[in-house]
Image: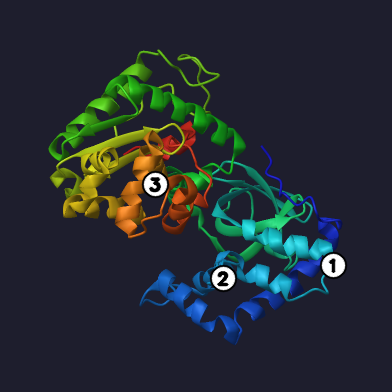
Amino acid sequence: MNQGAPDPTATASQDDLLPRSGPLKAALVAFGQSQRFTGEFRSAYANRFATAEPSSEADYINCLDRFVLEHRTRDGRTIVEQFVASRPDLPEAERAMLLGWAKAVEGIFEVERHDGDTAIMVNLVDELTYRVRSNLGPQLLKQLVPETIVWARVVPLGNEWLLSGALNSAPPEGRREMRRAAAELANTCPAAVFRNPDKLALGWELHRRLHEHFVEFFGADLAVVTGHELADRMAGFWNYHATRISAGQSPAPGQTTSSKNRDAPDEEQPPPVPQMSMSSDFEQAETVGIMFDEVEGLWFLPEYRLVRDVFADPALIAGRRYRDAVSGYLKSQSIPPIVLRRLAEQDPDRAGRVFARLLGKPRFTWQREGEALLRRYKTRFLDRAPLPGVTPLSNRQRAFLRP
């Protein structure tokens, strides 16, 4: 599948925009390095490198590239958005191109071939094909012979892509390790895989199947267990899921248990049972909720019974353990808003009384202020699109993950 860049507002062709991209990028970088953003860049730099120095000039260049294209400043805007706002003189096509650069793709690419001044590359993480150009001249890309593997950043340029930042090219003897690194990235960073719309669609199908097996095993999409039972109960579930797949009772959509394709997702085979190590917080908890929401996926909820009981009897919020538990759920960045939303929907009036007492706001009502409360504390969750809880990997990717 070819990967095109969503740039419907641009009226100029990529051939017209390519020579302008270089000067505009230089102006953007200078804008991002101005005194106005010195503190922001120091913070981003420290987050990336801590007390160490960049291992190479390429690392520094890519850190700066991420900063000007993707970093959001305190007002919520990216540097590139602020740059475009400061340049009302720019033609609409150039403004659209610059704003499109926020959709940068960073990953491990293998060069397939060349088509004139364009390099045809396959992203080994999302397994899409990208037509890549450079504003530094065609010789840069022509140095990359077929089968070369590079770590690169690319940004949209019309219906093609433009190199952004610095390339890191693997020597021939390092190519296998780079392919393994791409498979690891696919396995640990689902968002990078789900840029591929086919993998996204299949991921949701597999997610729904896993949800179905969860409900079959636990009897509902939410179960409450003791902390010391958690690991054994989850191991039992994963074994049940593997058995159901092995029995062929719910093969992957569009496939049968006998269908085989070297690069197709191999989910119809029994998946490996995850080796999950539970944190001591879960093991020591009196109770843990195990929730598999149809959209938000699988979550572990410490001391869930305390929180559930408060929503059933708001008077319990007067007790410190109950109050701390509800407050923890509200403020935690590891508990999604769907948990509190589901509890509140059972009886919005009682939920309002819980938060009225917790927040010291006697007139608080869930119906009027509940969503705003979640927005205040759970912005990270609410500002992202939900993704499947199952990441489909091709057989080729799985091969590099096997011990």
**Which of the pair 391/79 is nearer the observer?**
79
- Image mark for residue 145: none
Give the amino acid at mark 3: Pro
Instruction: Check disc 3 and report its element: helix, strand or loop.
Output: loop
Left or right of 106, for residue 348: left
The CA distance from mark 3 to mark 2 is: 24 Å
Disc nearest the viewer among 1 and 3: 3
Q: Position of residue 89 (x, y in %)?
A: 83, 74
Neighbourhood count class around disc 2 (C-alpha, 10 Å): few under 14, some 14–19, many 20 upward: few
Q: Is residue 389 above or below residue 102?
A: above
Q: Is residue 237 visible from the viewing direction of this image?
A: yes
Q: How is the image coloured?
A: rainbow
Q: Which residue position is annotated with label 3?
A: 336
Instruction: Check disc 2 and report its element: helix, strand or loop.
Output: loop
Q: Position of residue 320 (x, y in %)?
A: 17, 55
Disc nearest the viewer among 1 and 2: 2
Give the amino acid at mark 2: Asp
Which quarter of the rendering shows the N terminus?
Answer: top right
Q: Position of residue 111 (x, y in %)?
A: 62, 49
Q: Position of residue 296 (x, y in %)?
A: 43, 39
